[in-house]
Amino acid sequence: MTSFARGAENKPIRETAYETLKHAIITGDIPAGSRIVETEYAEKMHISRTPLREALRKLERDGLVEYMMRKGVVVRAFTVADVEEIYTIRNALEMLTLPAIVENATPEDVERLRKMLNDMDPYDEKNDIPALSPRARAFHTELTRLSGLKRILRVIESQDEYITRFSAISIAKETRRHAAHKEHYRLLEYVEKKDLDSFESLMKKHIERSKETCLLALNESKLAKKE
């Protein structure tokens, strides 16, 4: 499990415990189906059971754990509904940032983002998806930050760990990565031209396809487990 030390020392213990456990669950360090025994985890994390219990209640509200009869606290598996909801929220928020991105983007911003895409070209040519995927996410993050909409950005960034995990779920199913990479160049071209209509139209299709790919991979994974 990720060290309890991650996070700011000034945060309340319950918040640091919550963030540590959330990170470990989302990244798969604590797999779905695992029991979180209070005494065991309090000892591992060198904290008392009270802040741990408060962190677990918050994780339950997030839908990451559930209290089960005769088992206690158990880590939930991500469901199709979870993926659908998180992607839908994130995608809607990303769409809200597009007008500000087009308005704020400078020639220097465009050149910096184009260099990111150029650096991704060799991985695209080799179809090196494990190397390409995190770089594609980094490109999207930098593009979205150009909006300067701090409140929306904070909510989007709060979902980053989920999106990273969902990308790992879908990575084996990614059959359109080359097309997606080409779309990144087109999106940047629309930003450079200040063509908001084309930018919004392509971005909507682009991020919806990401959601569909993850949902398809998750469904196929569930079917494979039943066979």
Image: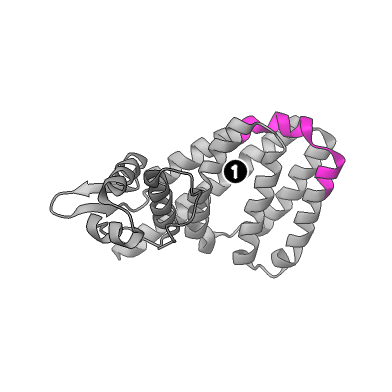
Tell whether position 81 is magenta.
no
Image coords of residue 202 (percent x, y): 68, 39
Q: Residue extending furthest left?
A: 70
Image coords of residue 201 (percent x, y): 68, 35
Q: Residues within 10 Å of mark 1 (few under 14, many from 20)?
A: some
Q: Residue at x 59, y 65 (%)?
A: 130
Tell whether position 97 is magenta.
yes
Q: Residue at x 73, y 53 (%)?
A: 182
Magenta residue span: 94-111
Is residue 2 placed above or below 106 in the rendered structure? below
Q: Looking at this view, is 144 or 14 the one in front?
A: 14
Q: Is residue 141 visible?
A: yes
Quarter of the N terminus within the rendering? bottom left
Choose top left, top right, bottom left or bottom right for residue 224: bottom left
Q: Looking at this view, is 102 or 223 the one in front?
A: 102
Q: Residue extending furthest front?
A: 10
Q: Main secondary structure of the magenta part?
A: helix
Residue identifier under label 1: 207
Q: Is residue 33 visible?
A: no
* Relative side of 83 to 164, left or right: left
Q: Residue at x 34, y 43 (%)?
A: 63
At mark 1, the secondary structure is helix
Image coords of residue 66 (percent x, y): 26, 47
Q: Residue extending furthest right?
A: 107
Q: Amino acid at mark 1?
A: Ile
Image coords of residue 56 (percent x, y): 30, 46
Q: Residue at x 39, y 60 (%)?
A: 221
Quarter of the C terminus within the rendering? bottom left
Its colouring scheme is: one colour
